[in-house]
Image (tube, helix red, strand yellow):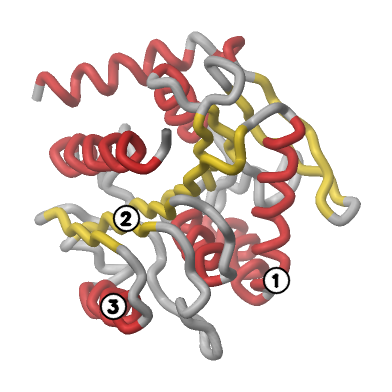
């Protein structure tokens, strides 16, 4: 319990340290997007953070600030567009659905975020991509593209592979963290991904957390599970320590 209290306290304090980072407006294929960048020092190892289906919100900013406190430069990408932060389920489905139907655009948006982070001084050659829920699905899409990143991390993300795709070009290590009680993304999906990664010799670790439903890291929600959040965050931080120099 004391660990999660410390985590939430740090996140709360981070929210008051917003000035440490900056909102960054950038363009991809001529369209405006608004990300968030924070870096504790020049040439710090980088984490690209991809948001949930409600867009880039205070949740991602708080996680970015927490990572910055640990010594990482973080660029929280925007895959929906500047000012697009849906609050209604139908709108969230619309924006995520458009990108699920246009996987090339999804990949280009992630590349655009990385290029923007590089332009701000981020070390994109020493970087990991991570995401939550929809962001986790986007991370796997980027991994399948053959992107040259050191690692790919998902928290309760979508795990399915579109028809015609596979992990034959994937570089870097994979860390997949999932709730065993997730009714949206099932343990069959989890097992299917494990088989795919093994078939293509992709270095990976996949962990499930008992009793954890979908979106178990979203503090303040009725799905939040403090034990799973603490354990998954601790594993994530060790992963970063091991592969980012």
Camera-near label (2 vs 3) is 3
| Sequence-wise first label, 1 or 3 | 1
Compared across the picture, whether 170 is left or right of 23 comes to left
Query: What is the quadrant of residue 214 in the picture?
Result: bottom left
> Secondary structure beneath disc 2?
strand
Q: Position of residue 159 (x, y in %)?
A: 38, 70
* Residue under pointer 2: 175
Q: Residues within 10 Å of mark 3 (few under 14, many from 20)?
A: few
Tell me the distance, in whole angstroms, between the alpha carbons under discs 2 and 3: 13 Å
> Secondary structure beneath disc 3?
helix
Residue positioned most to the front: 245
Q: Residue at x 47, y 27 (%)?
A: 72
Q: Residue at x 27, y 55 (%)?
A: 177
Q: Quadrant of the N terminus?
A: top left
* Residue under pointer 1: 104
| Sequence-wise first label, 2 or 3 | 2
Camera-near label (2 vs 1) is 2
Q: Residues within 10 Å of mark 1 (few under 14, many from 20)?
A: few
| Sequence-wise first label, 2 or 1 | 1
């Amino acid at each position: 319990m004391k660990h999660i209290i410390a985590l939430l306290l740090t996140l709360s304090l981070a929210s008051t340290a917003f000035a440490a980072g900056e909102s960054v407006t950038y363009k991809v294929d001529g369209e405006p997007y608004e990300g968030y960048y924070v870096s504790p020092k020049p040439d710090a190892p980088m984490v690209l953070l991809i948001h949930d289906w409600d867009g880039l919100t205070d949740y991602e900013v708080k996680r970015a600030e927490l990572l910055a406190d640990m010594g990482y430069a973080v660029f929280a990408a925007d895959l929906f567009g500047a000012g697009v932060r849906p609050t209604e389920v139908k709108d969230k489905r619309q924006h995520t659905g458009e990108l699920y139907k246009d996987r090339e655009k999804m990949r280009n948006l992630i590349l655009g975020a990385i290029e923007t982070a590089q332009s701000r001084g981020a070390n994109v050659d020493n970087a990991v991509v991570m995401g939550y829920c929809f962001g986790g699905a986007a991370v796997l899409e980027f991994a399948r593209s053959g992107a040259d990143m050191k690692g790919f991390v998902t928290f309760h993300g979508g795990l399915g592979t579109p028809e015609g795709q596979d992990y034959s070009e994937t570089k870097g290590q994979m860390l997949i963290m999932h709730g065993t009680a997730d009714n949206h993304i099932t343990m069959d999906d989890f097992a299917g991904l494990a088989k795919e990664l093994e078939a293509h010799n992709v270095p990976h670790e996949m962990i499930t957390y008992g009793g954890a439903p979908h979106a178990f890291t979203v503090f303040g929600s009725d799905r939040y599970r403090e034990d799973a959040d603490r354990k998954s965050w601790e594993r994530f931080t060790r992963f970063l320590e091991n592969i980012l120099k």
